[in-house]
Amino acid sequence: MSIWDTLVGQRPVIDTLTAAAAGRGMTHAWLFTGPPGSGRSNAAMAFAAALQCDQAGQGPDCPHRCHDCHTVLAGSHADVTRVRTEKLSLGVEEVRDLVRSSALAPNGRRWQVMIIEDADRLTDQANNALLKTIEEPTPATVWVLCAPTVEDLLPTIRSRCRLVTLSTPMAADVADHLARHQGVAPALAAYAAAASQGHIGRAKALATDEATRNRRREVVTLPTRLTHLGAAMTAAQNLLDAAKEEAEAITAALDAREKADLDAAYGVVERGKRPREYAPALAALQKSQKTRATRRVRDVVDRGLTDLMSVYRDAIAIGTGAHGDLVNADIAGDVRQLAATTTPELNLRRIEAILGAREQIMEFNVPVLLALESMMTSLLPTERD
């Protein structure tokens, strides 16, 4: 299996990065952009592996057997640092630590690679701290920043980076990837590829987890059940409750493990006493976990709103006679009913209402339930429906 196999439908990107790893067009700072699920993080890790790989000259056909490739992709290579955040923002202290590390010489004979996966979440102070080191790079250090769009970073940073843009992969490419590398049955792979709208991680979850498929079905069948104000309020609450439940399932084990590690580090378990330094450390941990839980809930809600939008998109496609496959072919009957009882113009306004709710939740920190309730009322039938 090649180190590039996780990049589905991204052949131009693979060609660019393999050429750079071989010394053609290499630079000290890179910006990988692309929509959620397009594979920005996978591209960054594959590029880091190629930069460390002794067989980089083999390009996209590197067999992924050498020690450097294996340790990079396993997250244990000494010269590859990967920064991800589960919080709402990436702060200046974390970036300063990264900058200090970047000034050191590589342990090996090739590159030191610094990857920031959530560069769009850098605070203003963090951006300023990063800018100085990108302006005056260490010769053997490579920075790889990942963000949805170039506008998510300061102009002064993005102007110093080589841009690599990933596209949303085609459903056929995603389905083929699931069938070949995940062993998913063709019919299920086709459903997951279409329903994920090109989001690779989402497609894998839909293909391999029935509970994920059931949660999605609850969301995409909402439009035909939104018949009155009470239904709208209930739908908003149910969507938030489901997001909290899913987020809790993801974070509970991690929270418990972090708490156990903290207790062990301060000797609370062995000695049965809490040293003076333990209380502030515990408070900091709890604050971090609460922030992470907030972001996780918002991310799950945002994913649900993306699924909901796809139903109205399908209804518009049917209403206007547009060619192409439906995202929600599994509920084609519901989509046709929606298209027959409303108009494309009204469904476009509903998509705008969903986009507005996403922006309120993700960008302006509006209380999630308030944003969802307002949005759901905008989705109710009107006199023209």
Image: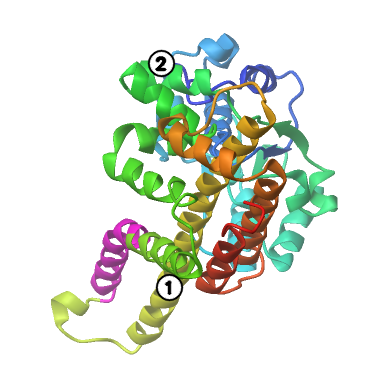
Q: Which residue is drawn at 46% across and 32% down?
A: 332
Residue closer to the observer: 334 or 352: 334
Question: Which residue ends up furthest to the front in the rendered image?
Answer: 383
Residue 220, given in percent of the width and then of the height, sits at: 45, 45
SS at mark 1 in the image: helix
The stretch drawn in magenta includes residue 172: no
When asked about the image quadrant of residue 14, the answer is: top right
Quick check: can you spot residue 366?
yes
Q: Main secondary structure of the magenta part?
A: helix
Q: Which amino acid does label 1 sit on?
A: Lys
Determine which residue is flagged by label 2: 1
Residue 216, given in percent of the width and then of the height, sits at: 40, 45
Q: In this view, does 5 lie above or below 168?
A: above
Crowding near the residue tagged with mark 2, few <14, some 14–19, many ≥20 C-alpha atoms within 10 Å: few
Residue 199, given in percent of the width and then of the height, sits at: 52, 36
Q: Which residue is drawn at 52% across and 19% down?
A: 173
Q: In this view, does 340 lie above or below 358?
A: above
Quick check: can you spot residue 4?
no
Residue closer to the observer: 168 or 242: 242
Label 2, label 1: how many angstroms apart (C-alpha)? 39 Å
Crowding near the residue tagged with mark 1, few <14, some 14–19, many ≥20 C-alpha atoms within 10 Å: some
Residue 94, numbered label: none
Determine which residue is flagged by label 1: 290
Residue closer to the observer: 22 or 107: 22
The stretch drawn in magenta includes residue 264: yes
Q: Which amino acid does label 2 sit on?
A: Met
Question: Which residue ends up furthest to the bottom in the rendered image?
Answer: 276
- Which segment did they paint magenta? 246-266
